[in-house]
Structures are given as C-alpha cells and as structure tokens.
Image (tube, rainbow, N blue to C red):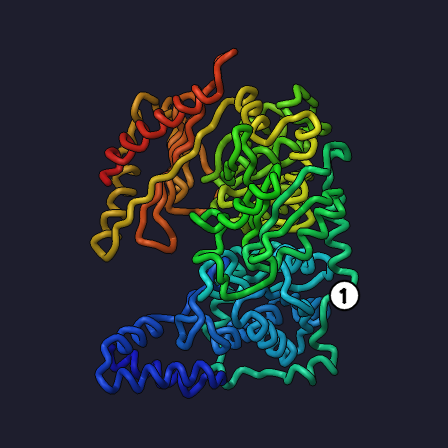
C-alpha cells in the first residue's frame, strides 16, 4: 500500500457520509497500521481507482472505498447525472424528472433513496418505485411517464455481494455514447460525497420532488404485455413451474401468466420472495450449474411441461422442457431466441406443419447481438424480414431498433442476445423476462394442444432453416504477460487471417476495429457498427467464428456457430452429432491459428 493510496483512503474516510462504511474503512486502516498485510492489500484494491461509469452504468462489490458500491459513490454519481441532465435540457429534466427503480438486493433501497434525494436537491423530480421492482418495469416507466432519464439500482444476476446503478436515457433505452462519457465526466467533477447537496426525503416528498410510481403504472405494463399475445388458442392448462431465484419477479410474472390464461403455475417456495442473501443459490444466474436444482425437483413432483426462471431483476428468462423419456432439458439462450423470434414473426409453429407469410415482411425488423446464433438471421431472410446484428449488450439492440424505426420506418418485432435476454415489440426498450415468459408459455401451450413440445419445434425449425449449433472457448491469460498474449493473438488474426479453418474455407473477415469487411474474392465494404476490438470469420455453408477479448476479465473469447443441413428423412440427432464434431474440429483449428 503506497503513501498515495493511504492518503486517498483517509480522504475518502473524511468525506464519506455513511457511518457504516466509515466504520468499515476505519477498521481496515487500523488493521493496516498494525501491520496486517491482508488489510493493506484490501485497502490497495479498494483504492486502485474509482469504480468506472460505463455504458452499463456502475456495478461492483458493496463496501467502503472508491472502487466499491456504496452510498458515497451513489451520491457523487447522481450529482454528475443531475448536472449532465440539466446541461442537456434543464426544462425537460425538471418537467419530466427521473424514474428510480430498485431491486431486492442489499442496499438497493438506500441507494434508490439517496439517488432521489440528490435529484430533488437539484430541482429534478424523482419517481421512485413504491416497492422493489423488476428492471423491465423501471424501463417501461421511463417511456410511460415521459421521463428525462431513468435509474435502476440492480446488479442483475451477479453474486449477492454486488449491486449496481443502471442508467436509461429519455428514449427508455440504456445509455450509449456520447451520454455515457458525458455523464462520466460530470461525475468526475462532482464534489466529495459529504458536500453533495441532498434534500431530506420527507421534505422532498412534501414538495413533490420525490413521488412514487402512479398507481396505474403496473396495470399499463401488464396490459401492454397482454397485447403482445400472438394467438388465443392452445392448451393453457399445461403445468408450469416458475422461480424468480430470490428476486423480485414472482408477483408480476405470475400475474402476467395468469392474465395470459395460465392457471397451473407453481412457484418454487424456497425462492419465491425477494432475498438479497440468495440463500439457496451460490450464484443467482439461471445459467449457472445448480441454480435451477430446486426448480427441477419441483417440476418432477408437479409433472410440469416447462420450467420458467427469471434472474433476480427479471430481465432475463431461462427455460427448461420436459423430455419424452423423463427429466428436463434446459434450453440455451439461442434456442429460446430462435423459438420466440420465429413465433412472433409467423404465429405458425413449424412442428405443426404450419407455414404463413409475414404480413408487411419488408417493414418488419428483428435484431440480435453479433455473438448470438445466426439462425434468427436465416429465418428472417427466408421470411423477407429485415435483420441486423449489433455489438454485445442490449443497449445496442434497443438503440439500433429506435434508429431504424426513425430512419427507415421499420416495425421492430423482436430482439435477443444469447445470454438469456429478449424483448418483444416496443413495450420495453431493454431485456424483458416477464414478456418473454408469457409469450414462451403461449407457444408451449399451442404446441401442447397438438401433443408437441418446444423440443419438437426446435427440430422442425432445424429441418426448415438448417440446424445451428453454438459453442464457446475462453482462454484465461492473467497478468500483464497474459494481456500481451491476448493482444498478440488478435494482432496475428488481423495481420494474417486464415483462409481456411479446418475443412471450411473463410468467405469473409469482418474487422470491427477497422470497421471493414473483406471478402475472399477481394471485395471490401464498410461496417456500420461502432468500433470494437472484435473479428468475425464467415465460413462456407453459413458457419461463423468470432474472436474478441473479454471486457471485464483477462480472457480471449472465441464464439463458434456451425450450420449443418439436415437431409430429408435424416434423424435430427444425427445432424446434431455431426455439427458438434465439426465444432470441435473448428475450435482446435482456430485456436491454433490464433496461437493460443
């Protein structure tokens, strides 16, 4: 621990208005002064630099220090946000106000109230959720209330020790450049936390500078979800097991399902109520091993047709399906995205032999993140629907949809990313685990009426559009030496891209840093996506490989998407086995080409 770090820690201690984090830091400083090396290292980590405000806002471990999530950080962040909003459009900020939502995590309520009190002191009204709320409801509130911005206090599916601060712009989508950089600069110029003006919460409420969401807001949201329904038929008596994983989804997701006609929904009782300690799961992410165990056990007892799971802030959806032979298969985000995308476009399940043209197909728009499966793109092109890919992160999907609606008059229908995030239509300009749950259940009910399942539908879509298999390989290379190796691997792939990976020729290479796409025949075209350190290799037959460094960990990540046609009369399982074997072949060959 250097003298500079010690000075910053003492300065922070003096400016922190929260007695709990002051006491926490003082104990560490006392231990460090007594020679405790663990305390010294802990202080050095907490003051290695401020928690960075980026396009997802803030997220970090709760605790004292500039690199942690705490009240001091929230106060300074909100002071910066208020200053930026007033500089952009003071009238709109003061008239429209800011939506403030919060989930059930530790310190979420305190962070939300601090946010509201700082906004009130700046003359900006805050509309605060009266109870812990799902992220999609807060995002919906921004547009429904005509707010100038929104803040959601959540760390989504991170471990229990985390919390975060997510910001929406007036378009109800997460912030992107230049607003993220503008807000970050305003935060840097904020005073010490103890000097940030705050209005007492009671005074702010009395002056109507802090208000709660209107009583009808949830009803408007649920009605908008209900209006997303594609078909009114199907067997709505199918038994469903649901878990919110100790998050805030149980009440509204259950209500939305009930309004959709699904009466046989059973919640996992141990996980039904919000609990920031997440006592039954080590990591409250439905993709993590073990997180769904209680749901699987309950589904077996209830003989459920499907399992639906939201993450703690309800913006993601996981799905599992009962197999004919017993037990359950958990679907990937790509599989759920493909199922939802095809269904909302056509309303005609492929496994029922239905085929239907999309009305005004040329005006319809679907989007996916670039690391998601290309299968939705194949479906869209076959149906004559506009399809585009965006950078990873739902902020890019939502903002691109808005751009194309404004510039080309397109009707945005669906967007998804492989990390279990989906949105349908324009109800929510972010991931919406509630809307996705209702429409997925609707599709399952339509199939069940004909003794089909979501697994049958996936097989039928594979036969119609080609089977796609997706996989990843992540290589961890820690330290400065590891970072150099990651950089060298990306440089090698740029300087000498392979013309062939395994048995498949490379048909085009897209460099998102240079914003160019070079075809094997020599043609070059520009890319419209924002600059990003990422490379995409299109392969013969519709397969693809993407390479990019992780933005948060010392890793280089490779994404593999293999397209495998299914011959007439061939078993789908045989094509799947062929695709998996091809993927392993590509993983080995591409890793060698990258030198990792």
Residue sitting at x 67%, y 43%: 438
**Residue furthest out toward the front:** 301
Residue sitting at x 54%, y 45%: 318
Image quarter hosting the C terminus: top left
**In the foreground, 516 or 476:** 476
Q: Quadrant of residue 81?
A: bottom right
Q: Number of marks in the image?
A: 1
**In the foreground, 262 or 340:** 262
Image quarter hosting the N terminus: bottom left
Which element is circle 1 on? loop
- Left or right of 261: which side holds 296? left
- Left or right of 584: which side holds 232? right
**Residue furthest out toward the top:** 569
Residue sitting at x 60%, y 54%: 173
- Residue 482: percent from the left, percent from the top? 23, 52
Task: Please tell me whether residue 362 is drawn above or below residue 490 in the rendered image.
Answer: above
**In the foreground, 487 or 65:** 65
- Residue 376: percent from the left, percent from the top? 55, 32
Q: Quadrant of residue 541?
A: top left
- Residue 453: percent from the left, percent from the top? 61, 30
Residue 405: tell me if it is visible.
no
Task: Please tell me whether residue 323 is drawn above or below residue 179 in the rendered image.
Answer: above
Few, some or many C-alpha atoms within 10 Å of disc 1 (few <14, some 14-19, many ≥20)?
some
- Residue 262: percent from the left, percent from the top? 72, 43
Residue sitting at x 71%, y 66%: 96
Task: Please tell me whether residue 388 is drawn above or below residue 398 in the rendered image.
Answer: above
Q: Can you identify the residue that label 1 sits on?
A: 214
Residue 347: tell me if it is visible.
yes
């Amino acid at each position: 621990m250097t003298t500079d770090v010690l000075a910053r820690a003492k300065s922070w201690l003096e400016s922190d208005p929260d007695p709990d984090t002051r006491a926490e830091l003082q104990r560490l400083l006392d231990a460090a002064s007594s020679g405790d090396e663990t305390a010294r290292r802990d202080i050095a980590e907490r003051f290695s630099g401020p928690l960075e405000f980026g396009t997802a806002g803030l997220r970090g471990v709760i605790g004292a220090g500039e690199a942690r999530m705490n009240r001091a950080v929230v106060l300074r962040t909100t002071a910066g946000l208020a200053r930026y909003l007033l500089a952009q459009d003071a009238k709109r900020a003061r008239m429209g106000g800011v939506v403030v939502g919060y989930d059930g995590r530790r310190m979420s309520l305190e962070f939300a109230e601090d946010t509201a009190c700082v906004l009130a002191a700046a003359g900006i009204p805050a509309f605060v959720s009266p109870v812990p709320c799902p992220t999609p409801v807060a995002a919906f509130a921004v547009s429904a209330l005509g707010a100038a911005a929104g803040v959601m206090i959540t760390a989504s599916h991170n471990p229990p020790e985390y919390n975060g601060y997510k910001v929406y712009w007036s378009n109800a989508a997460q912030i992107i450049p230049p607003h993220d950089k503008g807000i970050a600069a305003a935060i840097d110029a904020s005073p010490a936390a103890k000097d940030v003006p705050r209005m007492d919460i009671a005074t702010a409420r009395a002056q109507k500078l802090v208000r709660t969401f209107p009583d009808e807001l949830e009803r408007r949201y649920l009605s908008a979800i209900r209006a997303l329904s594609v078909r009114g038929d199907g067997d709505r008596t199918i038994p469903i097991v649901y878990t919110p994983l100790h998050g805030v989804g149980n009440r509204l997701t259950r209500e939305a399902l009930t309004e959709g006609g699904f009466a046989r929904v059973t919640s996992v009782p141990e996980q039904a109520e919000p609990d920031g300690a997440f006592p039954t799961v080590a990591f409250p992410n439905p993709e993590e091993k073990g997180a769904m165990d209680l749901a699987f056990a309950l589904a077996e007892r209830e003989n459920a047709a499907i399992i639906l799971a939201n993450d703690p802030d309800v913006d993601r959806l996981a799905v599992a399906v009962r197999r004919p032979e017993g037990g359950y298969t958990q679907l990937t985000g790509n599989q759920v995205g493909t199922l939802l995308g095809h269904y909302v476009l056509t309303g005609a399940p492929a496994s029922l032999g239905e085929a239907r043209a999309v009305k005004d197909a040329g005006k319809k728009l679907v989007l996916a993140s670039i690391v998601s499966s290309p299968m939705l793109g194949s479906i869209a092109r076959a149906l004559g629907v506009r399809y585009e890919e965006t950078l990873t992160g739902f902020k890019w999907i939502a903002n691109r949809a808005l751009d194309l609606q404004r510039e080309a008059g397109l009707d945005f229908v669906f967007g998804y990313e492989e990390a279990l995030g989906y949105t349908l239509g324009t109800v929510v300009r972010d991931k919406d685990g509630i809307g996705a749950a209702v429409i997925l259940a609707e599709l399952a009910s339509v199939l069940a009426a004909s003794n089909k399942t979501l697994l049958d539908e996936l097989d039928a879509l594979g036969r119609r559009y080609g089977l796609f298999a997706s996989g990843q390989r992540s290589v961890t290379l820690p330290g400065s030496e590891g970072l150099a190796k990651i950089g060298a691997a990306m440089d090698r792939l740029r300087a000498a891209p392979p013309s062939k990976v395994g048995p498949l020729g490379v048909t085009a290479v897209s460099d998102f840093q240079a914003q160019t796409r070079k075809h094997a025949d020599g043609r070059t075209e520009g890319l419209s996506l924002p600059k990003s350190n990422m490379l995409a290799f299109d392969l013969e037959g519709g397969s693809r490989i993407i390479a990019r460094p992780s933005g948060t960990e010392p890793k280089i990540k490779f994404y593999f998407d293999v397209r495998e046609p299914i011959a007439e009369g061939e078993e789908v399982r045989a094509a799947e086995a062929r695709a998996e074997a091809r993927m392993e072949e590509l993983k080995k060959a591409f890793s060698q080409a990258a030198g990792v």
